[in-house]
Amino acid sequence: MTSILDLDPRWRALQDMGGVMDIGFDHPSAWPHGERGDQPFVKLGDDQLASELCRFGEDRFICATLALPIRGSDEHVVFALWVKVPNEGFYAYIETFDGAASPAPFDGKLSSDLGPLANLGAKVSLEFNDTSTRPTATLAQGATDISLDDLIDLYEATGTLSRDDLSKS
């Protein structure tokens, strides 16, 4: 299906590169110890970081997915982002790995920098599907969709893609 974005050379270049790329955050913004990288687990003192969970000091974080439609197209970009959650929610989620039922939805605070889309600390609602998928995040305030310009800005900020990559013919 043709979209209005098909008229934008940056969109066409992105499509030529394989299409919309999802954006993942290695760790919560509050994590001071650097990237986890290829390591499955990082432990520094009492602080711990894995691909789905993080404990830093008294704070607990869960990695969740947020899907936003891209204005002018039928496509979505999916973010793997971090949400600071209450301790009770964190431990209820951990229990699902041992077969417990998924917890009821609860709120947390955004802990990944989404630039113009939402402020750090913005309220995020988490919904839990099953243990084979990450929780689904919904921003309580902030973007409900994303512009191509904002997407490109986030690609640059996260090192996913350079704006210059989209201007090459």
Image (cartoon, rainbow, N blue to C red):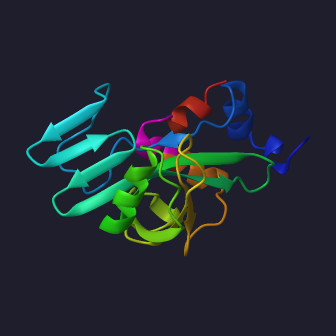
In the foreground, 49 or 111: 49
Q: Indicate whether residue 158 is drawn in magenta.
A: yes
**In the image shown, does 75 or 86 lie closer to the viewer?**
86
Query: Would you place residue 54 above or below residue 118 in this image?
Result: above
Image coordinates for residue 160, horizontal then vertical, percent: 48, 35
Q: Is residue 124 visible?
A: no
- Judging depth in this view, the residue of 10 and 53 nearest the camera is 53
Among the 4 quarters of the image, the one containing residue 82: bottom left
Q: Which residue in the rendered view is the most extreme toward the left?
A: 45
Q: Quadrant of residue 48?
A: top left
Magenta stretch bounds: 155-161
34 to the left or right of 122? left
Residue depicted at x 84% and y 50%: 4
| Closer-to-camera residue (116/111) | 111
Q: Is residue 80 visible?
A: yes
Q: Is 53 displayed left or right of 119 in the figure?
A: left
Q: Residue at the location (38% across, 51% down)?
A: 94
Q: Position of residue 53 (x, y in %)?
A: 34, 47
Image coords of residue 100 (percent x, y): 47, 52
Give the side of residue 77 with respect to residue 109, left or right.
right
For the C terminus, the quadrant is top right
Quadrant (top left, top right, bottom left, bottom right) of the N terminus: top right
Q: How many marks?
A: 0
- Furthest toward the right, the residue is 1
Q: Position of residue 32 (x, y in %)?
A: 18, 50
Q: Residue at x 56, y 57 (%)?
A: 128
